[in-house]
Amino acid sequence: MGALCTPAPPAHAVPGPQGRSVSALLTDLQQRYRAAEEATETYNATEEKLKEQRARAAELNRRLNRARASLRDSRGDAGRFARQQYQGATGLSPYVRLLLARDPQHALDQGHVIQRVAAGRAATIQRLTGGERRAAELADAARRALAAQSALADRQKKQRDEVGGQLKEVHELLAALTPDQLAAVRAAEEAGTARAQEEFVASGALGGSPATRPPSRRGGKALDFAVRQIGLPYRWGAEGPDAYDCSGLTYEAWRHAGRAIPRTSQEQWAKLRRVPLSKLRPGDVVVYFPKATHVALYLGDGMVVQAPRPGARVKVSPIAANPVLGAVRPDPGSRPMRGYTPPKLPEGATSGSGSDLGYSGDQAPGATDSR
């Protein structure tokens, strides 16, 4: 939602539901948003594992089908040899044929052929037994892969229900607010973000002149992509093209830049190269909260592009809008661009960027794709 046109009343002048103060209400809302995002990232992690497990199960089934086809061929060869052996059971042995032959050398040549045929039969039998064992192993592995896939799907359903429950609680709490109360909470959050940003910049954490530090070529492409998504809605578990969650935005931005990065915020923090905040350059991924449950893309000059939370849209925000944990760089070995020009932001992209409270009608829980 955008900010209301009328000035918000002072936070202390508007009591919250059940007599709670606006600051207590804001804290409650922020905690609920954070819990929902933690549940979302857990859901996303399970989704990634489920994709990997589906791919593994599919590959095992392909290998099993090939093994069974090879086994059928080996059984056919073995059956043919068995029929030949039965049909020739009453004939003379190769040794006797050699003794009775008028041309011993020709008989010896035939003996080599017989030996090669015997060796071929032995190889076929060995291939048959080995094929049976391999097919049995692959069948067992395929069954276990399918069971693991089913367990992951069940876990994901529970996590999806948990996210839905968290978002429902947020929506119900917001729905209980009057317009004046909502405006007061919004104003309190914006004021808190402004204070946090001022303190963060004054601390020197970003180093000197962060706005002039150019990105890498890929970092610039990732940032350009993220900027083009400004205004699209947040939706948990989404990675475009019509909606994003926080890590879905950073993941897709870097994918479009030609660099594959992990899908979830925790994996991005755990597996990508960490960089000091004083060395931040546009395109780097800024990570938030102690459990690394939120991410954004650094824009420069102390600002980020992010998919903030349910009910909000992709936007430009102060880097300190959430508690910063650190930053990672998907392409640590790349050089900064020369002659970098920052992307042009949509009109009004930096105005009113402090607050993300509230749902629009099409973003309320139950109105969106439940995945």
Image (cartoon, rainbow, N blue to C red):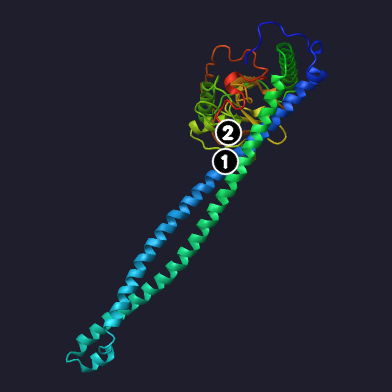
Q: Residues within 10 Å of mark 1 (few under 14, many from 20)?
A: some
Q: Quadrant of the N terminus?
A: top right
Provide the secondary structure element on which disc 2 rests. loop
Residue 85 is drawn in which quadrant? bottom left
- Residue 129 x/y as whole percent: 43, 71
Circle number at residue 47: 1
Residue type highlighted by circle 1:
Glu
Considering only order in the chain, which callout, 1 or 2, is on the residue closer to the N terminus? 1
Q: Is residue 87 left or right of residue 212?
A: left
Write down the quadrant of residue 125 in the picture: bottom left
Report the residue that reaches farthest toward the bottom.
99
Vertically, is 57 above or below 94? above
Name the outermost residue toward the top.
Answer: 6
Give the labeled residue for mark 2: 237
Determine whether label 2 and label 1 are within 8 Å by CB: yes
Amino acid type at circle 2 is: Gly
How crowded pointer 2 is (Cα within 10 Å; few <14, some 14-19, many 20+) is rated as many
Q: Secondary structure at mark 1?
A: helix
Measuring 54% from the left and 26% from the top, which residue is drawn there?
A: 243
Whether residue 99 can be seen here: yes
Residue 194 locus on image (x, y percent) = 72, 16
Would you identify the image quadrant in which residue 18 lies? top right
In the image, residue 119 lies at what x, y percent? Answer: 34, 77
Placement of 150 over or under 22, stated as above or below: below
Along the viewing direction, whichever of 175 and 148 lies nearer the viewer:
175
